[in-house]
Structure formats: C-alpha cells, structure tokens
C-alpha cells in the first residue's frame, strides 16, 4: 500500500510517501522552488516522492490531503455571518478565491495530479483528513510509543485550534478541542504582526527576540486578551483583534492597550518590541504548561506527543520537559502544516485502510527526519563547477579539521551532507566516535584534534 500525503494552498506545502505504514520520504515544496513557505501545489515534492516508487506516480494507491476544505469553508461562512456587517471587505476578498479554487479542491487536486500522471482516475484515489487529525497522526504514528497522550496546537485548522487526544496502537482518539476564533497560535501571530514580523513565518523571530526583553506586558495580556483557566483552556477577548473580520491581526483597541501602532517592519527593533516578545512568550509557555499539567493529571499514560505550529516553539516544549510531567516527550520535527502531509498519509494507512502499526522498539520512525533528496559529491562538484565556484574536495578527516579551525576563528560554516531534513529545524547528529564539538573543545584547549587512534569525527548537519 503506497500512500502519497499532500499539504498545500495555505502555507508550507509538502508531500510525503508512506509504504505499508513505513515512512519513505517527505519534503517541502519550498526546498525545490526556493520560495519561502511556498503554498502552491507541491509538484516538485511530489515528483521527488514518486521518483522513489517503481512505476512512479501511477503506482500510488491513495493520495491523502491534510484537511477538509468544506469544513474550512463552513467555518469561514459562519464567522462572517456571526460578525456581519463587519468584515465585508475580508469576505469580498476571500470569496472569489474560495469559489474558484479552494472550495473544489478535490477537483483541483485531481487536475494537478493528472498533469503529472494523466492515465489515472485520481478522484477515485483521493481521501481527506481533518487538519488536527493530520497533526495528531504526524506526532503519534512515528513516535516510539505504543500508547501516548497527544497535544496539537496551531492557528486554526477547519475549526479546531487546540486538540487533546490519545493514541493506542493504530487508533487515535481526539477527546477535547478548543475552536476558532479562540486560538493560542493566532494570539502569538497577533504579536508577530504587532512587532513588525510576517504572520505564519515570523513567529520564530518573536521567540528568538524574547530572551532580550522582560515580560512587562504579560499581566496585561492575561488581564485583557485571554481568559486562562487552571486546566489551560482559554477564551480570547475578540474586541482586541481583527483577524475574524478584517485584513489585519490587531485593531486600534489592541494598539491603545499596548501604547502605539504596530512596529514598521523596516524600523529598528526597540526594547519595547523585545519586551512585547518576552511577554507573549511567557504567556504562551504558561498556557502550554497548564494544558500539559491537565493532560498529565487526567491521562493514564506517561508519554506525550506534540504537533501543530505552536509545537515549533521549542522554548515552550522545553518547559514541558523540564517540568517532568511526562517520562518521554516526542515532537514531530515538521510540526507545522508541512507535517500534515505526512500525518494524512499515515492516517490513510492506519485509519482508512486499517494497516497495523508496529513500534518494534524503534526510537524514531522518521529516520531522524532525513527524508528528502540527497546529492552525491560528484553531482555537487559538477554543479559547483558549472556555477564557476572555487572549491576543494577533502576527505572526511580534513573536512572536520577545516571546520573546527573555521568555527574557532569565529567564521560561519555551511554543512551540506546526506538527505535533506524534513521540517524547519536544521538537525545535527553524530555519525562517528568523536563529534565536532569534542574537536572544538580540544582545539580551544590547544590539544591535537585527532584522538589517539588517529581517527576523526564527523557530523551530518542537514540544512537546505
């Protein structure tokens, strides 16, 4: 059973290939087009995945899409009706796109797939999963756990913005949800917008900015923007936000509360922006911790799986781990929408088709998230020559020596090796006995970089 998973048309389009429940490949479209957060139909990522299958795309048994467009359209319409007559400009801007494209995504997907493999009746092979089910599946199925609690948090899927569930064997049960417009992800994105960064891509900048500030506005947020309960459930005061009805995240009432208009993206960062970042980060961590504590208290399992865009907030994830609420925590590396492609494919295998899920004491069914294409040295050298680059090809030990020297000298190093990672985080893993950081410690101490046996170390740093 070969299943192709697809996420597309919103942001971070991707494709993933699963064969008989085993994860074979996954890649984001942006890695091929070089368009950051590319939302287009992922034809290049699909081509890569299909190229690993004998018979190509024609041999794919099912194609799984990561959310349900009709449910999303239902949420859109109900939101506009609930807030009418406010939001007409947003409604007028969104409806033509939905009516022409997004509402009929089954037809659109079949048409796009037919361009790649015209001899297949693709409408018969298409299945759809709910957005947060895809997130939950992407977290639980590749994890090493026979059973676990599952927490997913993001901006919004169809209706859900936060979901809590359990996984056991091949079954996933979503037990609780928080629905739009009450969303921790959208609250964080509101501050992303307000501090001058781009929504759906600049949130990591806010997280990175937070340590430079003080959470001076955290209590203001808790007193005015969010009604947070002891179990982590919450409601937002929508009078401060514009995302339900307008074309912005925040409104004048929000701006007045925090003392001014949103920061101009091209302006210098101020201490106020750093303090705002620290404040929303502190509130986000508090919400996540309260939810995690409630899950730990209510759920019988001592393992937790995380996915959804908020799970990319590694600082909040670290707080869960340090709190000691769970014995083990497993986080989907591509926790955002890209990972939904993988989750949808796994759901099609285990839920739709009923294939068994085997854990087999594996640590990680994601293969370290190294699921993208790789480029042999000869091909890389040929491309460098074609570009007129000056370079030298070194043996592994010499690469480590040069890298250690460069890092000690304060230089930046780009490391390209092996298969491309899936997800927004560049990953590092030791491949031989002495990792690079050990070499650096020796170099700073003035000791030889080699060990007594004359063998070097190497790491694989996957970064597109």
Image (cartoon, rainbow, N blue to C red):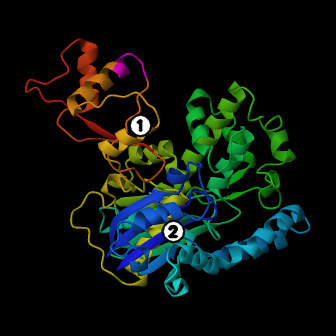
Q: Which residue is mark 2?
A: 6
276, 205: nearer the viewer: 205
273 on left or right of 312: right
Going 59% across and 41% down the picture, which residue do you hit? 281
The image quadrant where one finds the N terminus is bottom left
430 on left or right of 53: left
Q: Is residue 177 above or below residue 121?
A: above
Going 77% across and 35% down the picture, which residue do you hit? 263
Going 45% across and 75% down the picture, which residue do you hit? 173
The residue tagged with tag 1: helix, strand or loop? helix
Q: Position of residue 437 (x, y in %)?
A: 29, 28
Q: Position of residue 213 (x, y in %)?
A: 62, 28
Which quadrant would residue 220 be assigned to in this image? top right
Residue 152 visible in image:
no
Residue 286 visible in image:
yes
Dot label at residue 458: none
Q: Is residue 410 magenta?
A: yes
Q: Position of residue 428 (x, y in %)?
A: 34, 40
Give the residues in magenta. Answer: 406-411
* Number of numbered tags placed on the structure image: 2
Which quadrant would residue 193 be assigned to in this image? top right
The residue tagged with tag 2: helix, strand or loop? strand
Q: Is residue 353 magenta?
A: no
Q: Nearer the viewer, mark 2 or mark 1?
A: 1
Q: CA distance from mark 2 to mark 1?
A: 32 Å
Dot label at residue 384: 1
252 on left or right of 126: right
Mark 1: give few (<14), some (14-19) or many (20+) Cα within 10 Å.
few
365 on left or right of 38: left
Q: Is residue 25 above or below residue 106?
A: above
The mark nearer the N terminus, 2 or 1, is 2
């Amino acid at each position: 059973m070969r299943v192709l998973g697809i996420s597309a048309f919103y942001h971070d389009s991707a494709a993933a290939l699963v064969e008989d429940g085993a994860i074979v490949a996954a890649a984001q479209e942006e890695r091929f087009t070089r368009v950051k957060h590319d939302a287009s139909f992922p034809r290049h990522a699909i081509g890569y995945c299909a190229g690993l299958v004998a018979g190509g795309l024609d041999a794919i048994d099912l194609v799984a899409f990561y959310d349900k467009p009709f449910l999303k359209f239902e949420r859109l319409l109900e939101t506009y009706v609930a807030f009418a007559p406010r939001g007409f400009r947003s409604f007028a801007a969104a409806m033509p796109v939905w009516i022409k494209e997004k509402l009929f995504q089954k037809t659109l997907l079949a048409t796009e797939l037919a361009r790649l493999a015209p001899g297949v009746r693709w409408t018969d092979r298409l299945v759809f999963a709910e957005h947060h089910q895809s997130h939950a599946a992407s977290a639980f199925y590749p994890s090493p756990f026979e059973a676990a609690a599952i927490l997913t948090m993001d901006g919004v899927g169809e209706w859900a913005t936060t979901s809590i569930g359990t996984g056991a064997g091949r079954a996933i049960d979503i037990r609780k949800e928080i629905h739009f417009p009450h969303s921790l992800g959208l609250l964080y994105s509101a501050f992303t917008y307000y501090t001058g960064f781009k929504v759906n891509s600049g949130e990591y900048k806010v997280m990175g900015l937070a340590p430079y500030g003080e959470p001076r506005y955290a209590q203001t947020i808790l007193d005015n923007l969010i009604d947070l309960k002891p179990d982590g459930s919450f409601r937002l005061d929508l009078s401060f936000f514009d995302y339900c009805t307008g074309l912005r995240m925040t409104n004048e009432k929000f701006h007045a509360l925090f003392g001014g208009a949103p920061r101009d993206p091209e302006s210098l960062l101020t201490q106020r922006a750093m303090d705002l970042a620290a404040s929303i980060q502190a509130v986000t961590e508090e919400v996540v911790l309260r939810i995690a504590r409630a899950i730990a208290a209510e759920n019988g399992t001592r393992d937790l799986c995380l996915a959804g865009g908020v799970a990319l907030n590694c600082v909040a994830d670290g707080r869960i781990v340090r709190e000691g609420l769970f014995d083990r925590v497993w986080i989907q590396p591509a926790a955002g929408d890209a990972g939904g492609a993988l989750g949808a494919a796994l759901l099609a295998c285990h839920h739709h088709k009923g294939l068994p899920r085997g854990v087999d004491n594996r640590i990680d069914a994601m293969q370290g998230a190294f699921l993208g294409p790789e480029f042999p040295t000869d091909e890389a050298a040929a491309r460098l020559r074609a570009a007129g680059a000056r370079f030298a090809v070194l043996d592994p030990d010499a690469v480590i020596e040069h890298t250690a020297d460069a890092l000690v000298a304060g230089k930046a190093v780009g490391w390209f090796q092996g298969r491309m990672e899936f997800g927004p985080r560049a990953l590092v893993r030791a491949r031989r006995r002495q990792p690079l950081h050990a070499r650096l410690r020796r170099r700073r101490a003035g000791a030889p970089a080699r060990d007594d046996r004359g063998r070097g170390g190497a790491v694989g740093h996957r970064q597109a």
